[in-house]
Image (spheres, rainbow, N blue to C red):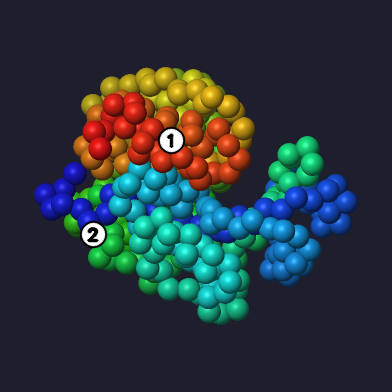
Amino acid sequence: MSANPAKYDVTGIGNAIVDVLANTDQDFLDTHNIPRGGMRLIDQNDARSILEAMKQTTMVSGGSAANSIAALASLEGRGGFIGKVAGDALGDVFRNSLQEMGIHFPTNPLRDGTETGRCLVAVTPDAERSMATFIGAAEHVSISDVDSDLIADSAVTYFEGYLFEQEKPRAAFVKACEIAKQAGRKTAITLSDRDLAVRQRADLLAFISAHTDIVFANEGEAMALMDKDNFDDALREIGALAPYVIVTRSGDGSLIVDPEMSVHEVAAIAPEILADTTGAGDAYAGGFLFGLSKDMSPEQCAIIGGICAAEVISHIGPRPEQSLRQLVKAAGLIEA
């Protein structure tokens, strides 16, 4: 992918969020105004009070792009991450989690009183997950956080669409793209959310056309970005935006539009048990980019992505519990 070998396969830039899970009951949801089965954004005071009220919590670092890099790490790929946490206990949880997976995380903590972002997940006895999310420090990624050496040494830099709406992170994206281009590296973005694609349509189209080589979207996001009611029309137009466009279709697999505008259709890989679809797209992107960084074909990249997604949706939580590398090896896609 570049004349010079990359030290890192993929570096992600995204929200640094800690998922805090606890078993609760309906009274807990009512007391803290958490919508059952849904999510609401909360401020720092609510985040503190809800966290204090949660008992026997489990904490796992999360965030969409970070989940993708975690999948890459499980494939034994070399990953980096740029994202903002505070210099607090939850920031340490996030940092330690990434470092335990061998992910390079050089971003300095925020020390202005804003706390680390968190998604407080209340799990009721029927296994329903209800969430209250405080973005916190995560949205404060800025140009100063862009590690030039890390970006230049990464085969692909991967941007989380959720951060695109904030002015400072968007400027950081552009800076990272400039560094990557100068170094002969690739850039990728995930659209993250259909409503975001609607709100930011014009700016996203301009950013993708000017700066990115790879776009990830699901069907709804692709149609929203291109303002189309017909998926085939949306695929044709979004496919012209970047050299590689990957559209995931849940149980119907994925479609890849390559630099020649050829469309490759790859079937989904069904999990043995469907437990929780959270993080499926993140895992798919991590697997696809791993394959791309190793110069595999689009179909091979998509199969690896499908294997990663199938593992993640077979259990609760967005991070892999089995070695993804062993699963991909068993499928005959890598030798060791």
Q: Secondary structure at mark 2?
A: helix
The kind of residue tagged 1 is Cys
- The residue identified by callout 2 is 152
* x then y, percent, for residue 123: 73, 46
Name the spot of residue 295 as percent of width and height, x first. 21, 37
Identify the residue at horizontal 29%, vertical 26% (top origin): 332
Residue 320 visible in image:
yes
Contact flag, marks 2 and 1 (Cβ < 8 Å): no
In the picture, measured across the screen, residue 256 lies left or right of residue 186, that is right
Q: Amino acid at mark 2?
A: Ala
Residue 308's tag is 1
74 or 166: nearer the eye?
74
Name the image quarter holding residue 195: top right
Residue depicted at 53% across the width and 75% down the height:
87
Dot 2 or dot 1: first in sequence order is 2
Q: Which residue shows up at 48% across the image and 42% down it? A: 320
Quarter of the image that includes the C terminus: top left
Q: Please tell me which residue lies in front, 144 or 334.
A: 334
